[in-house]
Amino acid sequence: MKKVIIAISAFTLCAGSVAARTKLVTMPQREYTRIDMKNPNQTIVEEERTVNLQQGTNQVEYAFSGVTVDINSIQFRPIKTPGSVRVINVNYPPNENALFWEVYSDKAGPGVFRISYLISNIHRSTAFEAVVAKDEKTLNLKGHTMVQNGSGENFASAELISVIGKPYNGGLQQSESKKIQAFSAADVRFTKKFHFDHNQSDQVALLYEVRNEKSSGMPELMLPPGKARVYQEDSQGSEAFLGEDWTQETGAGQKLELKLGQAKEVKVKRSIVKRKEEIVKLPIKNYHQTIRYQIENFKDSAVALTMVEHPGGEWVIDDIEVKEESGERDDIREKSYSTDVKQERIDLDNVKLHVQVPANGREKKKLNVYVKLILKNRW
């Protein structure tokens, strides 16, 4: 640790004698350092040092300055000793960044001790980088751990353990930042989806959905939340920036969603086309409400669209009808269209509607989804 010294006092007990400090040495260099960052709120440092012990009771002083250490978390444990060694007690001098251990050894010689403590201001975050293939069927995904050392301590050599990926061995100096690659997954299969929530925007959002499982090409690790930047290969052999998103924690088998902003190929217009009151018992009423989602798809292929509705309270979907609209202005025609609209109740107040939208933009056709809701027991 910064400006750390170790003082070893050997005490010889005999008639009429008093304890006297016999030796003062500089703290030995760290032989091994491990920085564990798996806990998002705490950083644990473990270090090993070899201390030359005198026979009898030794006083070990551990002093530091300018380092943000929780002094109450410091632990001192013998790992390899010349004989029988035990830590008798620990003293905390007032108003000092130091503590003293009394260590008894029945033999003199070098002893290896492990010192562990909680340290503050080692900041870390997770970042993802995805490069989508030109055919939009697969992507290459990399995960990185971003580490910044603001603890006041210099670690010339350390094993860094992060939430994801294998341990990294290297230095981490005060005020230094590192970008450590945690994993790399190539040719990961994903699904391109479109998402519409009228409470958030009147535009359709584009997202890529990746299953965090080996069958998709993922490492099937617990992925912490982080910022994801998404690029796509272009015809020139370079990468075009598509967008960025903050991901949620994603466990093995769960979906990793990357929202990339507004989709230009799909448009949705939501409107309430019918609303009727039904008196239950005044002042309580039910409302029969028909919502129309008017959907246009300008792509050359069908797309998967998810629409979110927020009825709130007690409600039920009475019916869903899908029609294909063609023509313009005074010559607008509708006919029934055969496709399934799947309902997914999110919670008591919200529901998702999933529909496959055909490629109809070039023929000036639209898909109209009519959702008939009954909003119950409203005041």
Image (tube, rainbow, N blue to C red):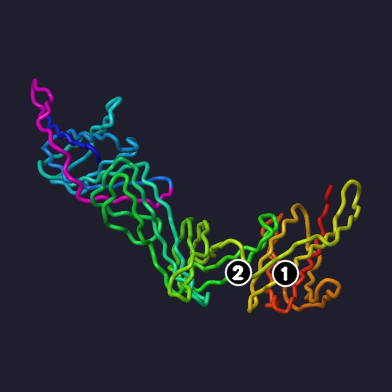
Q: Nearer the viewer, mark 2 or mark 1?
A: 1
Quadrant of the rendered structure where residue 237 is? bottom left
Q: Does the magenta portion include 30?
A: yes
Reply yes or no: does residue 152 show up in magenta: no
Q: Which residue is mark 1?
A: 295
- Is residue 357 positioned above or below 143 on the image? below
Decide: few, some or many residues near mark 1? Use Cα within 10 Å; few <14, some 14-19, many ≥20. Answer: many
Q: Position of residue 13 (x, y in %)?
A: 11, 27
- Tally of marks: 2
Magenta residues?
12-40
Instruction: List the residue tagged with mark 2.
Output: 193
Q: Main secondary structure of the magenta part?
A: loop
| Image side of residue 24 versus residue 256, left or right | left
Frontmost residue, 108 versus 115: 115
The image quarter in which residue 54 lies: top left
Which comes before the other along the chain, label 2 or label 1? Answer: 2
In the displayed orientation, state which residue is furthest to the top.
16
Q: How crowded is the residue under tag 2: few (<14 C-alpha within 10 Å), some, or many (20+)?
A: some
Quarter of the image where the N terminus is located: top left
Q: CA distance from mark 2 to mark 1?
A: 14 Å
Instruction: Specify the amino acid type for callout 1.
Output: Ile
